[in-house]
């Protein structure tokens, strides 16, 4: 597995709380020592927030459509 893919996997597991305490501690040491890992974590969080925000907006549109029969934004 490439370094980038390993970082992505670790970041996803870190954010979702899937790392056991030992791996979490190791990742946090790497996070504090390597600004590129910090950047990757921040970018991943922004992407997740964007996706969640989009999904929320889509849910609101669908609810509005069902309640009022409209597809206005």
Image (tube, helix red, strand yellow):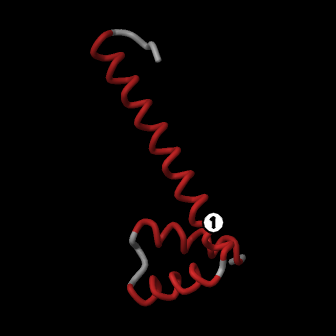
Label 1 crowding class (10 Å Cα cut-off): few <14, some 14-19, many 20+? Answer: some
The foreground one among 62 and 1 is 62
**Where does the image place residue 36, in percent across and percent down from the top left?**
68, 72
Q: In which image quadrant can residue 66 be found?
A: top left
Query: In which image quadrant can residue 16 be found?
Result: bottom left
69 versus 25 height, above or below: above
**Left or right of 58 on screen, residue 38:** right
The answer to whether residue 65 is left or right of residue 43 is: left
On the rendered structure, is 48 left or right of 2? left
Give the image location of residue 62, x and y in percent. Answer: 38, 23
64 versus 54 height, above or below: above
Question: What residue occupies the far left of the structure in this picture?
Answer: 67
Q: Residue at x 39, y 10 (%)?
A: 70
User: What residue is shown with label 1?
Assistant: 40
| Residue that appears at 43% across and 78% down | 19
Secondary structure under tag 1 reads helix
Q: How many marks?
A: 1
Residue 11, position as x, y percentages in the image: 54, 70
Please name the residue shown 56% across and 51% down the image.
47
Relative image position of residue 49 (x, y in whole percent): 49, 49
Give the quarter of the figure containing the N terminus. Answer: bottom right
Residue at 63% from the left image edge and 76% from the top image edge: 6
């Amino acid at each position: 597995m490439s370094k980038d893919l390993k970082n992505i996997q670790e970041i996803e597991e870190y954010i979702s709380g899937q790392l056991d305490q030992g791996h979490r501690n190791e990742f946090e040491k790497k996070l504090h020592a390597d600004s590129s890992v910090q950047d990757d974590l921040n970018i991943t969080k922004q992407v997740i927030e964007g996706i969640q925000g989009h999904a929320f907006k889509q849910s609101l549109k669908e609810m509005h459509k069902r309640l009022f029969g409209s597809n206005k934004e």
